[in-house]
Amino acid sequence: MSVQAPNPTLAPVVRYPEALAPTPTHYCPGCTHGIAHRLVAEVIDELGVREETIGVASVGCSVFAYNYFSVDFAQAPHGRAPALATGIKRTSPDKVVFTYQGDGDLASIGAAEILHAAARGENITVIFINNAIYGMTGGQMAPTTLAGQRTTSSPLGRDVKLQGHPLKMSEILAQVDGAAYVARRSLHDVVNIRRAKKAIRKAFEVQQQGLGFAMVELLSSCPTNWGMEAQEALDFIRDDMVPFYPLGEFKVPGNGAPGGAKGDGQHPKGGR
Amino acid sequence: MSVQAPNPTLAPVVRYPEALAPTPTHYCPGCTHGIAHRLVAEVIDELGVREETIGVASVGCSVFAYNYFSVDFAQAPHGRAPALATGIKRTSPDKVVFTYQGDGDLASIGAAEILHAAARGENITVIFINNAIYGMTGGQMAPTTLAGQRTTSSPLGRDVKLQGHPLKMSEILAQVDGAAYVARRSLHDVVNIRRAKKAIRKAFEVQQQGLGFAMVELLSSCPTNWGMEAQEALDFIRDDMVPFYPLGEFKVPGNGAPGGAKGDGQHPKGGR
Amino acid sequence: MKGTVTVDEALCKGCGLCTGVCPKGLLALSTRFSERGYHPVELTDPDDLCTGCELCSVICPEAAFTVYRERAAA
Amino acid sequence: MKGTVTVDEALCKGCGLCTGVCPKGLLALSTRFSERGYHPVELTDPDDLCTGCELCSVICPEAAFTVYRERAAA
Amino acid sequence: MARQLLKGNVAFAEAAIRAGCEAYFGYPITPQTEALEHMAKRMPELGRTFVQAESEVAAINMVYGAATAGVRVMTSSSSPGVSLMMEGLSYIAGSRVPMVIVDVMRGGPGLGNIAPAQSDYNQMVKGGPHGDARMIVLAPATVQELIDLTAEAFELAERYRCITVVLADGSLGQMMEPAELPPMTEPRRAEDRPAWALTGASGREPHAITSIYLDPEEEEAYNQELQATYREIERQEVRFEEAYLAGARIAVVAFGTAGRLSLTAIEAARDEDIAVGLLRPVTLFPFPEERLRRLAHEVDAILVVEMNAGQMLGDVRRATRERVPIHFFGRTGGVVPMPEEVLDAIRGVQAELMREEAVA
Amino acid sequence: MARQLLKGNVAFAEAAIRAGCEAYFGYPITPQTEALEHMAKRMPELGRTFVQAESEVAAINMVYGAATAGVRVMTSSSSPGVSLMMEGLSYIAGSRVPMVIVDVMRGGPGLGNIAPAQSDYNQMVKGGPHGDARMIVLAPATVQELIDLTAEAFELAERYRCITVVLADGSLGQMMEPAELPPMTEPRRAEDRPAWALTGASGREPHAITSIYLDPEEEEAYNQELQATYREIERQEVRFEEAYLAGARIAVVAFGTAGRLSLTAIEAARDEDIAVGLLRPVTLFPFPEERLRRLAHEVDAILVVEMNAGQMLGDVRRATRERVPIHFFGRTGGVVPMPEEVLDAIRGVQAELMREEAVA
Amino acid sequence: MQTEIVISGFGGQGALFAGQLLAYAALDAGLHTTWFPSYGPEMRGGTAHCTTIISDAPIGSPVVRNPRAAIVLNLPSLERYEPLVKAGGVLVVNSSIVDRRPRRTDLEALLVPGDDTAQELGEKRVTNLVLLGALLARLPVLELSQVKATLDHVIPAHRRNLLETNLQALERGAALGTSEAVAPV
Amino acid sequence: MQTEIVISGFGGQGALFAGQLLAYAALDAGLHTTWFPSYGPEMRGGTAHCTTIISDAPIGSPVVRNPRAAIVLNLPSLERYEPLVKAGGVLVVNSSIVDRRPRRTDLEALLVPGDDTAQELGEKRVTNLVLLGALLARLPVLELSQVKATLDHVIPAHRRNLLETNLQALERGAALGTSEAVAPV
Ligand SMILES: Cc1ncc(C[n+]2csc(CCOP(=O)(O)OP(=O)(O)O)c2C)c(N)n1
Ligand SMILES: Cc1ncc(C[n+]2csc(CCOP(=O)(O)OP(=O)(O)O)c2C)c(N)n1
Ligand code: SF4
Ligand code: SF4
Ligand code: SF4
Ligand code: SF4
Ligand code: SF4
Ligand code: SF4
Ligand SMILES: [Mg+2]
Ligand SMILES: [Mg+2]
């Protein structure tokens, strides 16, 4: 979108990213999927790779991601985005390939595909949106749903004895040798959003350097299915999710061992 | 089998386990699948649970396990044994349920099922035979195949850059909250076989105590597809597999954290 | 004036997140309905308090903001 | 005699693993063919050296061994 | 039980519970998710088993496991999810343990959409699963029938030790209609589980439930057993519903929602003095083969109406040997045909009959 | 290229390579594993892509990915593995990217065994995948034909932007026969990838390859496109082989290995002066509908021979309208029928013809 | 005799509930009925609409192209359904936010200020019932009393506190429905 | 004119390779041929057998119930194939380990001490070729010289060192095949 400065002494410092399609999204008001989209688009712009990037959309609220990024896109069956990305990257090694997956998609039905993409060290970037819920289908329990959290398929709150414990995918994947970069960040406030963007940028750079599998897990909100206002939902991330899902870089190129597997200790409230 | 003492002053101290069907197996000579079978049967006998045990065979050389144990058995599609076991245990909580799976079955096609059975803390026992190869189909690369190891699908030796890094399933699953007991043992010599049996026993006791998911990974041999003699194959386990796949208990009831994630330091040669 | 912002009303969904982060409290949801049926956010900055600090644009899920800052004096 | 073992020939596949672990070296593969076409292992213990230590039975993949030991004198 | 206004998805879930379903394993997918949600709430209340599986692949194999234990077990899903169950269904059919699956079909292929469709007829009736396995396929047209057939599906599955499919579609799953639920039946007690079930080899030989028969001759003998069962099912279980066929010159053949839509169109057509009736197959396997053969001798033309590109059409052509002209009207991709469109199609067939007679 | 003695599995893998296959993704399964092993060796040598996927589900989706990138890509598997690919195949059909799959069928259902069978005819021809998607299905009977059809499969897949299935069976995969391989063709250069492919939105609008159309009307329009393509395929690509049909009173209809077995039986029968010939469909979709219809006017009886419980049989009955008696001989569960058995079946049909004439 | 009623509006305007209320009431009145929704993935905005059919005989199709009546809560719904309502049918328009009059003259059109009335009642969320009340005043398909009685037992627990307002909304709507004012001349 | 030959024995006795060698030789001789194995999962023991068909015309079925000739390397194979060989056909028995004579009199049976001969040649693994040589002496389907020539170029690299012994095995077999001694009276 071309911007007309309201006043000649002023220069635009933030404008609509080129890699973001100039169209409104279908996301609910305040849903941080939108923030994640913008950050990815900004990084693609900054790296100047829009014209050689191929995205893989998954099945979830972000199924229409291909409408929102102005890059080539494939849409994968539920959970299989890493497999499609593998097929694309192996046959188009000069392209920048990323997947955009929800927690049901990546951690539940797609657990084998993400684990093996990591083990193979597929040279792709994975954007993992952890909103602790199945958004698109109306709020069922996700593998990342917190203990005690009410969902339409855990109406009394998730009972870990019967319904299992939430999965910490970043910690798990950081264990795998083929993984080059694994970080968890949060979208609940400005400071954390800025940290998230740095991580996303790293995850793309790791791919450009051919270092292997890179994933950024983003703690994200689902105001609609959490039954909260937009800001309330961000507070839920800060107060409930971050304490269970520590933020940090769990694997960075070079350090084989899952360094900082306990997170980087950054206090969640620090962001405020 | 009834045993006739060759001499009245002698008493049988080791006899054919009751839980083992009195029939020869189809396994190749020297294949340690047979040792694993015997150990499981001995444990079932010692715990006196043969009549309330239900096994789940997987797809692999051990597909016919149901012919070799004198307990009830289901045979699962490739990789899905933990799902069947879940269906059985949830509807027959008073039964002792175990799966017997190879590395292709558990770590490749069945990666999602085993990860989620662990996360749910399914109260089952998993016997995981890691022989670093696809035995039944004639020696293709498994997710556990060592770097550089030649197989019919990695004819030049596994190139981790192209074909991925071997997966350490015990370390990965020990990370998961629902897992109560996770250990890796080896079948390459008498001392280690005895340790393996202790671990298997623990894995069944953990289930009896309702503590959750229990798995024992057993480093096992495939003389046929490794192209080795029986003893050579055991030496390969000791000299090549154990150094990469540290033996030890990675999770024991009580210790939430993946204690000893680096193994218990027991020197592989210690067994000799 | 140090800075200012414009909001693309076609994009704004009136989630209100930006209103919470503006250090100067310059942003508020209007009572109007936008074409897509939302109450769009509006900047009210009579005393030119906006610094162009970008915070609003960082938190906006719809990338609705364009932020301007004073040009380095030529 | 302290102990002895019997081998179920129907089970033995002549893999030879037991021969390597017997501390007394009492086990060896015969040249005969078993019904299933293997060279079964045989115990040769003229001087009653077998201690019933069980090592052979521990390593045998076919559970082919029965191991006997002297009864505690009643 | 009094009639209540019930949503299809909730109705079949509650019907299954009342029919003594002891365990449900599933994975969310629109347009059947309300069934899973209902099970999530009700099954624990009743001390029965509910597990939200990690995928449809896992779900069908949990069902397989529970079935080997001899309990009444079911799952439900929709098109893409059902496609992921094909291997599991083949194993289950191949080891003859009973189970029930409700397939609430949606628009395809691929991810498609979440609107109602009937485009998985071939998948469920002909052979989505590999091998020569067949499944009983029941096609309800109303919420009441959805309830009744779901409850009965367990009986059929157990009688023949086979898979019974309730083949619904998004509209049936999402709509509300007054219907009556069956009374609650307690699940069978553990000691009443079938003799073949895995219950622990106590005081008997161990059981093995498997689908592998390495010796082809053995596998063939097993297949002959299966085929014999299918023949028996074809003899015993064929069901269909007829309306206005007496004296009809045109027969509309349609199943499920398409059948019910057509009925409205047929009644409108009869008001226009078009002699048209309805044959609605209720069982798709077994297919009303013989009834259709006769039908081709009773009417002058047949109109097949489906919410797909023409799948049951092939079976109608085969069964009737095309003794009379077979016409087709279908909408695809999740479009629910309006009765008015079906009426137009009927008028078209009528017009053609007139033309022929004019010629003759 | 001179004729060489080639094993079926190796032959089709090498044929694909020479046809310019740029990427192979698969998972080991008997009886097709030699193909995967050949690819594991050859593809890296040639600087092409080989990945042993973690499962068939992953394999088909890697194929999907590579197909969206516009490269010649294939996979191969066998019955249980193919069942796991149904969702992926539906997505691929639903987004119109070309690919080739070789299905080396084995005995089923379930885990079954690894012996040759044809019991996945319905799965591949009728609709294993959900939705109204179809796949071109080619059925070779010899190693040479397996080679030729595999190579051509890529052409067909790209011409119609669809999935082409080479439907073989364990015997064809495992047997050795002299055959000639096509000359090596270089894979197409990156810059020659099709216009619709995902190659990066450089100097053009971004491409999206998807199978979701939330608006049923849109989805239907898309389905109509697909159906139009299928009709075109039915017009253009029907193939079959005939032998001894001139003057024959009995026609054997059989595909693949069953067809070649039958030929031997037919020749033996002709030595006994039984006027019998062979119609061997080479394309199963499109099915030689019209040829079969005519055939029913040329002969007095038809014998369908399959290595299953009677799957193509239904299509033969439909296409012929059963104008003449349709007999069936099948072996299941991995049993390869001996030509002698087929000969007996032919004699049986002949005897019945005689009886009828006696009566008449 | 069968009556088809379509209710359509933005998600959140209560179109689906109003249609369900009609179906519940029909059931209580011992009539045959079906309720057929249009639905999308949770997060999709856009219009939500449903078809309720009420009949004294068993109902075949739960959907029809040309309903007897339609309640349109927003402009897009008016655009979509005005052309479809049967001649002689009833079309109820939420005139508070729909700024154009219906064009057809062969049906009974009511311009009911739904949102404004709801505002007056101090509860924005009852617009749907105001319009439903108006429709019932013109469409002899169910007694208003019946619908009120039904509402009393089908209203979700967490909305029970709003029962009174809901009943008032129905009545106000009914009153508007009968007044001449609402009919476009 | 078509000839079918079945070769059957324990896994490891080389039945499959002997059958392939025949097929390769047939190809070299410009004839039509097929080789059809029976196969099982890698680790399964039991018998391995294959059918090689050689013909001057295109071959239909790669399997037949009644082959023209059979080489049986062990007892189970004799039990299975003796009844199946066509009358007038040839049956070659590895008499070194098969301790019973064929019962049929309507075919040409050869008792060839395969293993013993192999032992003499100092290479247990050539039993299969000894028996093949014997068969070729009685079955005019391929020239021995042809088979030897073919063996020279199809023998796997890692077995090349055994080529000489293999060729000798074929010759010794052929010699035995022609000597009267081998025929049971
Ligand atoms: C095979 C298959 N199973 C189930 C579904 C239904 N489905 C669509 S989205 C979804 C879950 C989405 O949750 P998540 O991945 O967390 O994404 P979110 O919507 O929360 O962003 C499911 C189960 C499907 N489309 N395909
Ligand atoms: C869905 C499916 N895919 C592939 C196969 C073929 N298959 C049988 S066993 C096996 C691998 C077995 O390897 P592993 O699990 O390591 O067991 P092992 O034989 O080594 O003990 C495979 C791929 C199958 N039967 N089913
Ligand atoms: S449902 Fe949740 S995740 Fe989906 S768009 Fe709405 S808020 Fe976002
Ligand atoms: S193939 Fe390997 S794993 Fe299988 S039985 Fe033989 S030795 Fe054991
Ligand atoms: S740029 Fe800063 S000061 Fe200006 S409106 Fe945005 S947040 Fe407020
Ligand atoms: S954050 Fe963005 S979408 Fe939300 S109110 Fe502010 S401008 Fe509108
Ligand atoms: S270890 Fe067992 S099988 Fe092996 S040789 Fe000894 S007795 Fe025989
Ligand atoms: S028991 Fe001990 S001493 Fe006796 S044979 Fe076995 S290993 Fe040797
Ligand atoms: Mg989510
Ligand atoms: Mg293995």
Image (cartoon, coloured by chain):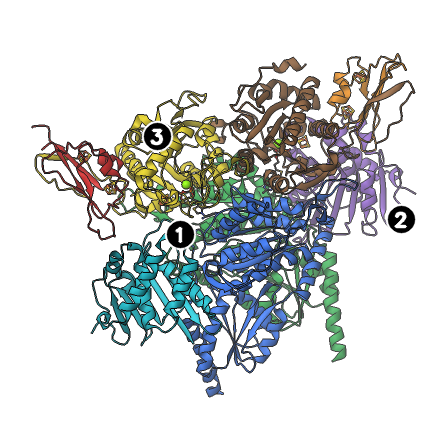
Chain colours: A brown, B yellow, C orange, D red, E green, F blue, G purple, H cyan
Residue H180: give x, y in percent of width and height. Answer: 23, 73
Callouts 2 and 3 on one subunit: no
Residue G23: give x, y in percent of width and height. Answer: 68, 43
How would you rate the neighbour count of disc 3 (Cα within 10 Å): few for under 14, some for 14-19, many for 20 or more? Answer: many
Vertical placement of residue E5 versus F77, above or below: above
How would you rate the neighbour count of disc 1 (Cα within 10 Å): few for under 14, some for 14-19, many for 20 or more? Answer: many
Q: Which residue is mark 3?
A: B208
Q: Which mark is residue E212?
A: 1
Q: Nearer the viewer's eye, disc 3 or disc 1?
A: 1
Secondary structure of residue under mark 3: helix
Q: Nearer the viewer's eye, disc 2 or disc 1?
A: 1
Q: Is residue B136 visible?
A: yes
Callouts 3 and 1 on one subunit: no
Q: Which residue is mark 2?
A: G105
Residue F299: give x, y in percent of width and height. Answer: 55, 79
Q: Residue at x 33, y 36 (%)?
A: B234
How would you rate the neighbour count of disc 2 (Cα within 10 Å): few for under 14, some for 14-19, many for 20 or more? Answer: few
Residue E120: give x, y in percent of width and height. Answer: 60, 53
Q: CA distance from mark 2 to mark 3?
A: 78 Å
* Chain of the residue under label 1: E
Q: Residue at x 57, y 71 (%)?
A: F241
* F98, H114: nearer the viewer: H114
* Chain of the residue under label 2: G
The kind of residue on which mark 1 rests is Ile
**Ligand 7 occupies quarter:** top left
* Chain of the residue under label 3: B
Viewport quadrant of the N terminus of chain B: top left
Q: CA distance from mark 2 to mark 1?
A: 72 Å
